[in-house]
Image: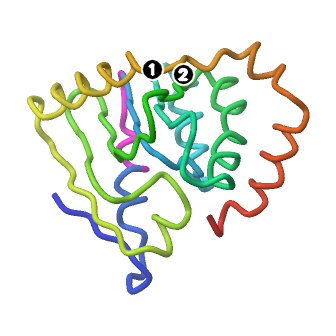
Amino acid sequence: QIAASGPDSDYPHIMEAIFTAINGAEDYIRITTPYFIPNDQMLTALKTASRRGVDIEILIPKEGDSWAAKYATNSYIQELLESGIKVYHYCKGMVHAKTMVVDGLLSTIGTSNMDYRSFEINFEITAIFYDEGISKKMKEIFEDDVEHCEVVDMEEWENRAFWEKVKESFSRLWAPLL
Protein backbone atom coordinates (compact mmCIF):
# COMPACT_ATOMS: atom_id res chain seq x y z
CA GLN A 1 0.00 0.00 0.00
CA ILE A 2 1.28 3.50 -0.76
CA ALA A 3 0.55 6.44 1.53
CA ALA A 4 1.39 9.94 0.38
CA SER A 5 1.17 13.24 2.21
CA GLY A 6 1.84 16.82 1.39
CA PRO A 7 0.56 20.36 1.55
CA ASP A 8 -1.90 19.59 -1.24
CA SER A 9 -3.76 17.02 0.88
CA ASP A 10 -6.49 17.66 3.41
CA TYR A 11 -5.30 14.71 5.51
CA PRO A 12 -1.89 13.59 6.80
CA HIS A 13 -2.21 10.07 5.34
CA ILE A 14 1.26 8.86 6.35
CA MET A 15 0.82 10.02 9.93
CA GLU A 16 -2.60 8.37 10.08
CA ALA A 17 -1.22 5.07 8.76
CA ILE A 18 1.66 5.07 11.27
CA PHE A 19 -0.67 6.15 14.08
CA THR A 20 -3.06 3.30 13.27
CA ALA A 21 -0.21 0.76 13.16
CA ILE A 22 1.11 1.92 16.54
CA ASN A 23 -2.34 1.75 18.12
CA GLY A 24 -2.90 -1.72 16.69
CA ALA A 25 0.45 -3.11 17.84
CA GLU A 26 0.29 -6.00 20.28
CA ASP A 27 3.87 -7.30 20.56
CA TYR A 28 6.56 -4.92 19.31
CA ILE A 29 7.40 -1.82 17.29
CA ARG A 30 10.83 -1.00 15.82
CA ILE A 31 11.37 2.50 14.41
CA THR A 32 14.41 3.92 12.64
CA THR A 33 14.37 7.61 11.82
CA PRO A 34 16.98 10.34 11.44
CA TYR A 35 14.61 12.95 12.90
CA PHE A 36 12.31 12.02 15.76
CA ILE A 37 10.28 15.14 16.45
CA PRO A 38 6.78 13.69 16.92
CA ASN A 39 3.58 15.62 17.18
CA ASP A 40 1.48 15.14 20.32
CA GLN A 41 -0.66 12.41 18.75
CA MET A 42 2.32 10.24 17.78
CA LEU A 43 4.07 10.75 21.10
CA THR A 44 0.93 9.82 23.01
CA ALA A 45 0.33 6.76 20.79
CA LEU A 46 3.87 5.49 21.39
CA LYS A 47 3.83 6.09 25.14
CA THR A 48 0.40 4.50 25.47
CA ALA A 49 1.42 1.46 23.42
CA SER A 50 4.49 0.99 25.62
CA ARG A 51 2.45 1.29 28.80
CA ARG A 52 0.07 -1.40 27.57
CA GLY A 53 2.96 -3.81 27.08
CA VAL A 54 4.17 -3.26 23.52
CA ASP A 55 7.98 -3.55 23.31
CA ILE A 56 9.12 -0.39 21.51
CA GLU A 57 12.63 0.40 20.32
CA ILE A 58 13.60 3.57 18.47
CA LEU A 59 16.90 4.05 16.64
CA ILE A 60 18.07 7.62 16.03
CA PRO A 61 21.46 9.05 15.07
CA LYS A 62 23.86 10.06 17.84
CA GLU A 63 25.13 12.87 15.63
CA GLY A 64 22.86 14.32 13.01
CA ASP A 65 23.25 16.72 10.14
CA SER A 66 21.27 19.46 11.87
CA TRP A 67 22.13 20.92 15.25
CA ALA A 68 18.56 22.05 15.93
CA ALA A 69 16.96 18.77 14.83
CA LYS A 70 19.40 16.76 16.98
CA TYR A 71 18.53 18.71 20.11
CA ALA A 72 14.81 18.73 19.32
CA THR A 73 14.97 14.94 18.91
CA ASN A 74 16.89 14.60 22.17
CA SER A 75 14.23 16.63 23.99
CA TYR A 76 11.83 13.67 23.65
CA ILE A 77 14.18 10.96 24.95
CA GLN A 78 13.38 11.44 28.65
CA GLU A 79 9.65 10.97 28.03
CA LEU A 80 10.27 7.89 25.93
CA LEU A 81 12.54 6.28 28.51
CA GLU A 82 10.09 7.05 31.33
CA SER A 83 7.39 5.26 29.31
CA GLY A 84 9.54 2.15 28.94
CA ILE A 85 10.61 2.77 25.34
CA LYS A 86 14.17 1.77 24.53
CA VAL A 87 16.17 4.37 22.60
CA TYR A 88 19.37 3.70 20.66
CA HIS A 89 21.90 6.22 19.40
CA TYR A 90 23.37 5.04 16.11
CA CYS A 91 27.15 5.63 16.23
CA LYS A 92 28.34 4.52 12.80
CA GLY A 93 27.44 7.78 11.05
CA MET A 94 24.23 9.46 10.04
CA VAL A 95 21.41 6.94 9.92
CA HIS A 96 18.99 8.07 7.25
CA ALA A 97 16.58 5.13 7.08
CA LYS A 98 12.92 5.82 7.74
CA THR A 99 11.38 2.49 8.65
CA MET A 100 8.98 0.87 11.06
CA VAL A 101 8.18 -2.78 11.81
CA VAL A 102 5.10 -3.74 13.81
CA ASP A 103 4.52 -7.26 15.19
CA GLY A 104 6.27 -8.94 12.26
CA LEU A 105 3.14 -8.33 10.21
CA LEU A 106 3.43 -4.76 8.96
CA SER A 107 6.41 -2.67 7.94
CA THR A 108 6.98 0.72 6.36
CA ILE A 109 9.74 2.22 4.24
CA GLY A 110 9.56 5.72 2.91
CA THR A 111 10.73 9.28 2.78
CA SER A 112 8.78 10.41 5.84
CA ASN A 113 10.61 11.16 9.05
CA MET A 114 8.82 10.93 12.37
CA ASP A 115 8.37 14.69 12.53
CA TYR A 116 5.97 17.56 11.97
CA ARG A 117 7.35 18.59 8.59
CA SER A 118 7.05 15.12 7.09
CA PHE A 119 3.52 14.65 8.38
CA GLU A 120 2.09 18.09 7.54
CA ILE A 121 4.31 20.19 5.25
CA ASN A 122 6.62 18.17 2.98
CA PHE A 123 5.63 16.01 0.05
CA GLU A 124 6.38 12.48 1.32
CA ILE A 125 5.64 8.91 0.33
CA THR A 126 5.70 5.69 2.33
CA ALA A 127 5.25 2.09 1.27
CA ILE A 128 3.35 -0.07 3.74
CA PHE A 129 3.95 -3.81 3.51
CA TYR A 130 1.60 -6.40 4.99
CA ASP A 131 4.06 -9.23 4.56
CA GLU A 132 5.68 -11.40 7.23
CA GLY A 133 8.77 -12.09 5.11
CA ILE A 134 9.51 -8.41 4.49
CA SER A 135 8.81 -7.57 8.14
CA LYS A 136 11.14 -10.33 9.32
CA LYS A 137 13.93 -9.04 7.08
CA MET A 138 13.38 -5.45 8.19
CA LYS A 139 13.52 -6.48 11.84
CA GLU A 140 16.80 -8.30 11.14
CA ILE A 141 18.19 -5.14 9.54
CA PHE A 142 17.09 -3.15 12.60
CA GLU A 143 18.84 -5.65 14.89
CA ASP A 144 21.99 -5.45 12.75
CA ASP A 145 21.90 -1.64 13.03
CA VAL A 146 21.54 -1.90 16.82
CA GLU A 147 24.99 -3.54 16.83
CA HIS A 148 26.36 -0.09 15.91
CA CYS A 149 24.44 1.74 18.63
CA GLU A 150 24.67 2.86 22.21
CA VAL A 151 21.64 2.21 24.38
CA VAL A 152 20.49 5.43 25.99
CA ASP A 153 20.65 4.78 29.73
CA MET A 154 18.07 6.56 31.89
CA GLU A 155 20.47 7.44 34.71
CA GLU A 156 23.13 8.76 32.36
CA TRP A 157 20.51 10.67 30.39
CA GLU A 158 19.12 12.34 33.50
CA ASN A 159 22.65 13.42 34.45
CA ARG A 160 23.59 14.99 31.12
CA ALA A 161 24.96 18.52 31.18
CA PHE A 162 22.67 21.41 32.05
CA TRP A 163 23.53 23.17 28.79
CA GLU A 164 22.48 20.11 26.80
CA LYS A 165 19.06 20.35 28.45
CA VAL A 166 18.86 24.06 27.65
CA LYS A 167 19.68 23.42 23.97
CA GLU A 168 17.04 20.67 23.89
CA SER A 169 14.36 22.89 25.44
CA PHE A 170 15.15 25.75 23.07
CA SER A 171 15.12 23.45 20.04
CA ARG A 172 11.84 21.86 21.09
CA LEU A 173 10.18 25.25 20.95
CA TRP A 174 11.02 25.33 17.25
CA ALA A 175 10.08 21.69 16.63
CA PRO A 176 7.11 22.43 14.34
CA LEU A 177 9.43 24.36 12.03
CA LEU A 178 12.30 21.85 11.90
* Separation (CA) of disc 2 from disc 1: 8 Å
Pick the quarter of the image with the C terminus: bottom right
User: From the viewer's perspective, is 148 left or right of 162?
Assistant: left
Mark 1, other Cα within 10 Å: few <14 / some 14–19 / many ≥20: some
Magenta stretch contains residue 20: yes
Image x and y of residue 12, in percent: 42, 69
Q: Residue furthest bottom?
A: 8
Q: Residue furthest front?
A: 93
User: From the viewer's perspective, is 12 left or right of 154?
Assistant: left
Image x and y of residue 123, in percent: 37, 75
Would you place residue 27 above or below residue 29 in this image? above
Image x and y of residue 150, in percent: 53, 18
Displayed quadrant of residue 138? top left
Displayed quadrant of residue 151? top right
User: Pointer 1: what residue?
Assistant: 55
Ranked by sequence position, the earlier of labels 2 and 1 is 1
User: Pointer 2: what residue?
Assistant: 86
Q: For this rendering, which residue is in front, 113 or 96?
A: 96
Magenta stretch contains residue 66: no
- Which stretch appears magenta? 19-27
Mark 2, other Cα within 10 Å: few <14 / some 14–19 / many ≥20: many
Q: How many marks?
A: 2
Report the residue at 42% width, 59% height from top: 15
Report the residue at 41% width, 40% height from top: 95
Report the residue at 70% width, 46% height from top: 71
Helix, strand or loop at disc 2? strand
Q: Residue furthest right?
A: 162
Whether label 2 touches label 1, CB < 8 Å? yes
Circle 1: residue type: Asp
Image x and y of residue 55, in percent: 45, 20
Circle 2: residue type: Lys
